[in-house]
Amino acid sequence: ELKVEQNPLFLSMQEGKNYTIYCNYSTTSDRLYWYRQDPGKSLESLFVLLSNGAVKQEGRLMASLDTKARLSTLHITAAVHDLSATYFCAVDALDSNYQLIWGAGTKLIIKP
Amino acid sequence: EAGVAQSPRYKIIEKRQSVAFWCNPISGHATLYWYQQILGQGPKLLIQFQNNGVVDDSQLPKDRFSAERLKGVDSTLKIQPAKLEDSAVYLCASSLDRPRWGHNEQFFGPGTRLTVL
C-alpha cells in the first residue's frame, strides 16, 4: 500500500527565512504533485513533477523530485506572509485506477 | 477555460436529513472524483468515475452515500440519511485521461461545506 508522509505537519516561520517541506512516499512512483490550500478554500495545483530529478519553480517556491530516494521537497525562499497556507503533496499510485495518494498536509504560518 | 463548478457552496442540515451536491467538471475531463475533507486533514477519496463508469468506490459508505455521473459529464453526490460525522467539505475534482496525457493532475472545485446538526 502506498503511503505518503509529509513533515513537518506544522511550521511557523518569520518572513525572510528559508525553509523546506518534505514529502516521502513508500513505493515506486515518478509522478508527484504539490497543492496549496488557503483557509476555507479549495486546493490549487502548484507543481506537477513527472520524472526523477524534475525541478519546478514559481516565485519563491521550488519543488523537486528524487524518485530513487522516494522524496520530494518544497523549498520556500525568503518567505512572505502571502505564502501562509496548507501545502499538500500527492503521489500518483501508478495503478490502473489512476488515483492520487495524499499526504496529511503541512500548515505553514509566516509571521510578518 | 472554466474551472470545476460545484453547488451549493454551503449546506446546513439536521441529522437524518438528506442532502445532494452537484459537480460540473472541466470540459473534456474524463475522470471525476469526489473527496471528503474533514477539517485539518487531507482529502479522502470517496468515489472515482471514468466517463460515466465507476472506477473505485471502495471508501464510499454505501449504506448512506450514493453518486452518479450521467452522460459522463455532471455528477451528483447524495447523503441519506446524514450523520453528525458527515460534517466536512465535499470536494469535486476532475482530470484528463491519464493514459493519454501521462499525468493525473487534478483540478478542484470550490467545495461544499456541509454542517450536520
Image (cartoon, rainbow, N blue to C red):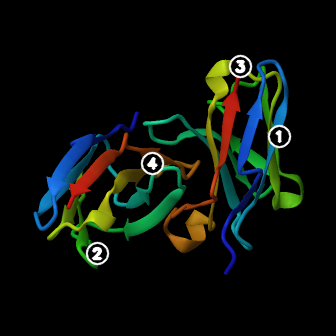
Q: Position of residue B19 (x, y in %)?
A: 82, 35
Point 58% across, 40% down: residue: B45
- Tell me: residue A26, above or below residue A71: above
- Residue type of the residue flagged with mark 1: Ala
- Tell me the subunit letter for badge 4: A
Q: Are marks 3 and 4 on the same chain?
A: no
Badge 3: how crowded within 10 Å, few (<14), some, or many (20+)?
A: some
Left or right: where B2 falls relative to A56: right
Q: Which residue is mark 3?
A: B83
- Tell me the subunit letter for badge 3: B
Q: Position of residue A98 (x, y in %)?
A: 55, 53
- Residue type of the residue flagged with mark 3: Lys
Q: Which residue is mark 1?
A: B20
Label 2 with label 4: CB-CB less than 8 Å = no
Q: Secondary structure at mark 4?
A: loop
- Residue type of the residue flagged with mark 4: Ala
Q: Nearer the viewer, mark 3 or mark 4?
A: 3
Q: Quadrant of the N terminus of chain A?
A: top left
| Mark number displayed over residue A56 | 2
The span from disc 2 to disc 4 (Cα, nearest Å) is: 21 Å
Q: Are marks 3 and 2 on the same chain?
A: no
Badge 4: how crowded within 10 Å, few (<14), some, or many (20+)?
A: many
